[in-house]
Amino acid sequence: MTFTFDARVARRDFDVSFTLEEGETVAVLGPNGAGKSTLLNLISGLLAADDGHAELEGASLFDTRAGTQHGSKPPHQRAVALLAQEALLFPHLSVLNNVAFGPRSAGARRQASHAAARRWLAEVDGSEFENRRPAQLSGGQAQRIAVARALAAEPRLLLLDEPMAALDMAVTPAIRRMLKRVLAGRTALIVTHDILDAYTLADRVLVIERGRVVEDGPTREVLERPRTAFAAGIAGLSILSGVRTPTGLRTDDGIELAVSTGAAAANATEWPAPDAGTAVIVAVRPSAVTVSNRPPAAAVNAIEGVITDLEQRGDLVRVRTDRLAADLTARRVAELDLTDGSRAWFSFDPGAAALYPATRPRAR
Ligand SMILES: Nc1ncnc2c1ncn2[C@@H]1O[C@H](COP(=O)(O)OP(=O)(O)OP(=O)(O)O)[C@@H](O)[C@H]1O
């Protein structure tokens, strides 16, 4: 294990433990106020835990169990680099000297630190800016330089706090590509609200809610078989929980649903279908859901819902209820006269849903 973390902060109701393998990039997802920044601040040394310990490649970052002599290491001695939303470059230094700052602070001579800085600038496609001042860079260019500066300090763990959130949408694909390159094989945690970042950059996903880890698993596993409403929401799926029956499941509110789990099913589970009686979850894509004003005669799975929200998404409208959501054309929404608070029937084909155990098998 490269990194072990276990900490509590009572005044923030925070209690989180997890480990990272060498070279693993993990996306941290969670709603506002969940504790994502608290986690990064504890690791980087900007916040002290009431109780807990963290170890990076055998070196203790903090350990409340060990008494004062093994207490908390100051941030600059942790071999951890934190990349914030804003680039936060030193305004009075050139780009080259910004990137050379880490190696210089670690004792490298001017020439060696400049050579290292040029290597990292090339890595982020930022060589052409080496003589500029931060004020002469666009947001995307500044963020590239901030990445080079963080990496030039040769951290053993890189923390990224929504690194693309403050950028113009037009530059995010290029920055995401650059991050994919530099994060390959690097031990890193990236806080993001973006499912594309998670898929592109992370091997694994941790979902944090109310100061607790509520999901932890390989990226595809968490985003394609979510167990919590938050993960389902970010993955754009509707989930219903219930108990496995011979033909599908009975939801917690007593609705019988049929779900095909054979190899021919669209979302066949990768492990044997759960036994009857076990707690299961069914996930349905809004694009697979049909909406009608009356109970559909032939539909196997039909659930009546009260519409809570209508959201225009490109050429479709996502119609949400407290149970299922559907993507419909605006014309269809008008034909069905759907508005907030109105009732409708939402149905889906048994082969269009994924059924899986409510508890995730342990990844490791
Ligand atoms: N400086 C602070 N002092 C006291 N409580 C704080 C402080 N900062 C955050 N909190 C509380 O700690 C909890 C976790 O907040 P945190 O900022 O870590 O969440 P977050 O997941 O990073 O949220 P966001 O996505 O909004 O940035 C919240 O209840 C928050 O109100």
Image (tube, rainbow, N blue to C red):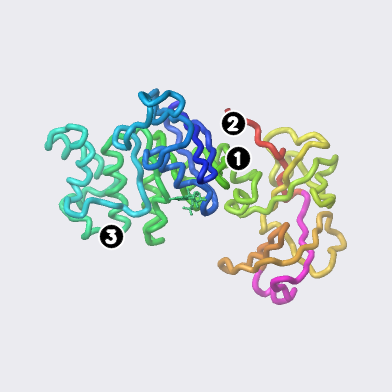
> Can you identify the residue that label 3 sits on?
138
Q: Which residues are magenta?
A: 329-350
| Residue 95 picture location, percent across and down | 20, 50
* Viewer can see residue 3: no
Residue 212 location, quadrant: top right
> Can you identify the residue that label 2 sits on?
363
> Can you identify the residue that label 1 sits on?
221
CA neighbours of label 3 inside 10 A, class few (<14), some (14 to 19), many (20+):
few
**Some atom of ligand 1 lies within 8 Å of the CB belonging to the residue at label 3:** no
Name the residue at the front extreme.
Answer: 68
Residue at horizontal 71%, vertical 40%? Answer: 358
Point out the image quarter for the C terminus. Answer: top right
| Residue 286 picture location, percent across and down | 67, 58
Nearest the eye: 349 or 112: 112
Give the residue type at disc 1: Glu
| Residue 316 picture location, percent across and down | 61, 67
